[in-house]
């Protein structure tokens, strides 16, 4: 769970609590998880800062920097060190997330020892980390004391706590008993759920735009396919004079449209999965990965089938309305 400043429940970056709050919390709440005698209590500072390569003409970016201690690895078990070592206090060192390095154009294979500029301060990358599927993968970590010194602040942003026996109500009772600390407590899941709700209108807008673009592409494909098959009015009439019933000829057109549309849709789906699957899309201070799974491939197939049905209906509509002699004279 997250203990943060009262009134800042919607943004850890805006939260500020006293640096002594973690110690008071540990002493006041019984039932905090321990590993090898170390409590799962991680004081952290979250700050958005400009980051760039320490080189002339180097790339620049706005990144999320997190000041942490060793306890951060206890409360964030999804984090995995992939190279180098943990940054030391007072040495101007940082730990780089995989997505954060990719955004800045740093090669993960040669990242160790690279220099970056954080808000005008040169720092050295001494370790790399991964946390797939989480925001941490796009963050920069450095010692808590170094970040607070860099920001010239005496407060921290929050405390991340793992409980073992205690409950959310116990921590809430602590925050209510110490009004002087001005604390609030949220389950981590609830915090990110509130962020998700905040961005819900943006997600709806993106979904509407995506549906409109997909609909335009599907109608364009159906129109092109119908135009290709609608020129076969005379051919269909010839098949009818040879003894094939109209429904059989129409079914043949539908089958051909289905083969063409499904082949194109599935080929496009496979190419999209190969080219776009896992691609990182950058925005402001973060990234998100494009996921293309079996469901997306199935959606491509269903869309191709719908396009085929619409194209077959459009291409046979003209022929069905004509008598056979007139259809044979059609050019």
Image (cartoon, helix red, strand yellow):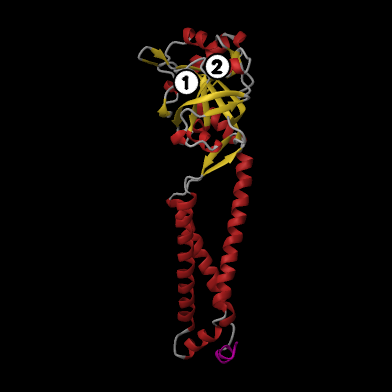
Q: Are marks 2 and 1 in contact (CB under 8 Å)?
A: yes
Instruction: Say which residue appears at 55% left-offset and 16% top-offset.
Output: 146
Instruction: Say which residue appears at 56% left-offset and 66% top-offset.
Output: 221
The residue segment tinted magenta is 324-331
Label 2 element class:
helix
Which of 33/64 is in front? 64
Residue under circle 2? 146
Residue under circle 1? 87
**Where does residue 6 sit, x and y in percent of width and height?**
62, 18
Against 272, residue 74 (above or below) is above
Check if residue 326 falls in the magenta segment: yes
Left/right placement of residue 57 relative to residue 79 reads: right
N-terminal-most mark, 2 or 1: 1
**Where does residue 141 sit, x and y in percent of width and height?**
51, 24
- Mark pair 2, 1: CA separation: 10 Å
Against 142, residue 177 (above or below) is above
């Amino acid at each position: 769970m997250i203990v943060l400043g009262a009134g800042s429940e919607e943004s850890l970056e805006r939260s500020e609590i006293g640096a002594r709050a973690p110690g008071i919390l540990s002493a006041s709440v019984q039932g905090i998880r321990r590993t090898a005698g170390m409590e799962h209590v991680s004081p952290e500072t979250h700050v958005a800062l400009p980051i760039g390569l320490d080189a002339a003409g180097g790339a620049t970016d706005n990144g999320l920097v997190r000041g942490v201690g060793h306890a951060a690895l206890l409360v964030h078990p999804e984090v995995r060190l992939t190279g180098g070592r943990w940054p030391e206090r007072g040495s101007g060192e940082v730990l780089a997330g995989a997505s954060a390095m990719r955004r800045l154009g740093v090669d993960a294979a040669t990242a160790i020892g690279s220099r970056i500029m954080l808000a005008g301060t040169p720092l050295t990358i001494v370790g790399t980390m991964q946390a797939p599927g989480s925001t941490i993968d796009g963050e920069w970590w450095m010692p808590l004391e170094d970040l607070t010194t860099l920001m010239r602040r005496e407060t921290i942003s929050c405390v991340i706590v793992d409980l073992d026996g205690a409950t959310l109500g116990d921590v809430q009772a602590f925050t209510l008993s110490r009004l002087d600390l001005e604390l609030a407590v949220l389950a981590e899941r609830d915090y990110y759920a509130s962020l998700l709700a905040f961005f819900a209108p943006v997600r709806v807008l993106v979904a509407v735009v995506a549906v409109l673009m997909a609909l335009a592409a599907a109608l364009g494909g159906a129109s092109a396919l119908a135009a290709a098959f609608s020129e076969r009015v005379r051919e269909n009439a010839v098949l009818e004079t040879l003894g094939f019933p109209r429904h059989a000829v129409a079914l043949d057109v539908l089958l051909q449209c289905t083969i063409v549309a499904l082949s194109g849709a599935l080929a496009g789906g496979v190419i999209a999965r190969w080219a776009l699957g896992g691609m990182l899309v950058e925005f402001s201070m973060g990234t998100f990965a494009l996921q293309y799974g079996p469901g997306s491939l199935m959606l491509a197939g269903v869309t191709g089938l719908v396009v085929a049905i619409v194209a077959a209906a459009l291409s046979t509509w003209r022929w069905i309305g004509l008598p056979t002699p007139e259809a044979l004279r059609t050019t």
